[in-house]
Amino acid sequence: MDSPFGLLAELTYRCPLACAYCSNPLNMADYSAELATDEWRRVLAEAGDLGVLQCHLSGGEPLLRRDLAEIVAEAHDLGLYTNLVTSAVGLSRPRAEQLRAAGLDHVQISIQADEPAISDRIAGTPSWRRKIEAMGVVKELGWPLTVNVVLHRNNIDRVAGVLELAEEVGADRVELANTQYYGWALRNRDALLPSRAQLRAAEVVVRAARERLRNRMDVIYVLPDYYSRYPKPCMGGWASRQLTVTPNGDVLPCPAAQSLPLPRASVREDTLERIWAESPVMTAFRGTDWMPNPCRSCDRRELDFGGCRCQAFQLTGDAARTDPVCHLSPDHGLVAKAVEAANADSRADALPLIPRPHGVRPSPRTPTA
Ligand code: SF4
Ligand code: FES
């Protein structure tokens, strides 16, 4: 068993956006009793003792936590590299200065498209202009900036514009990540999944941009796994290098695992060290012993770890099956059918995106110590 390298600290699932591709849980009420500041302090200290080096402060929208600067300062004092993963709604100049003073190392801002009306429609709320302003503040304060764009059928044709925008705002890195189909995103999958022709066109643009922007801006492009022969090595292997702590203190090997029928483990009831080493949620799919065939006898089992457990569960109802993305999976037809539909001549491009309802947010109570 390795030490975890990265901690995803999901500070709250409250969020001002309503993205159609959201992968956060739908049962928001279960997460309304958010960890207090002191509880996060303890989690960060225990994570540092476990070997964690990077802390990604995420959500929902982490800026909705009034104690964010205190949490950042604690992580900073513990020597963790801190990355704020934000929609930037609420990242005013005074708030940014407060976070800078607290020692925040890096900011990642999501944007939904290069054009305001399209971006706001996908986000389900007006936010584009505030995001661009916040990107300016981030650069002025001297932070490294990553611009993150979740790609799908409705914005992938705009990749060239997105790259230009990232260049204009002075991003150090742009992350073009095709949608992962968990949570609300799975409900919208047919409207979100791009066609093969769209992907080919985007790849040409990305390749040219990488060449042009070499040494100036890193361009990360994450392909949709539905179009791959083999699955992604999700999280680098179950409970291998990453862990997630959810707003109510549940500990998970990945952000989507709360949907799996596994016993809960909470920092409110146990130490992070014991949870990492011994809890059923961490040990269930660690390593390769749990694997069924075809993974068990496959040469790639130490490379992709049988793919994604959450995707296997969402598509087949059994988290221990081979990820249906794999062409060797007995369930591959489930993925092939979705891809076929996305490429059918008769495919109506106007399938509506259903924004994630705002109404399922927990109460905006922010506990403090
Ligand atoms: Fe990976 Fe399993 Fe497919 Fe082999 S059979 S490539 S281990 S998912
Ligand atoms: Fe949970 Fe892939 S998202 S294992």
Image: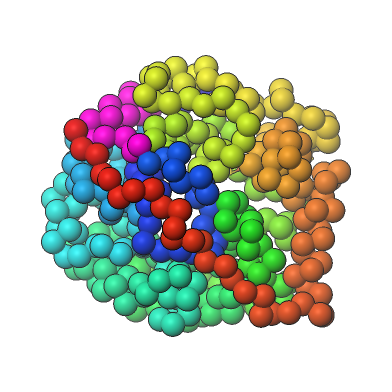
Residue 5 falls inside the magenta stretch = no
> Which residues fall within the magenta stretch?
33-51
State the quadrant of the C terminus. Answer: top left
Question: At 31% across and 35% down in the image, what residue appears?
Answer: 35
**Relative to 60, is 171 above or below?**
below
> Where does residue 218 sit, x and y in percent of width and height?
44, 64
Question: At 82% across and 80% down in the image, what residue appears?
Answer: 345
> Where does residue 11 sit, x and y in percent of width and height?
34, 43
Question: At 69% across and 79% down in the image, what residue appears?
Answer: 349
> Where does residue 89 sit, x and y in percent of width and height?
30, 64
For residue 85, say whether it is visible.
Answer: no
Quadrant hosting ligand 2: top right
State the quadrant of the N terminus. Answer: top right
**How many marks on residues?**
0
**Relative to 329, is 90 above or below?**
below
> Where does residue 72 sit, x and y in percent of width and height?
23, 43
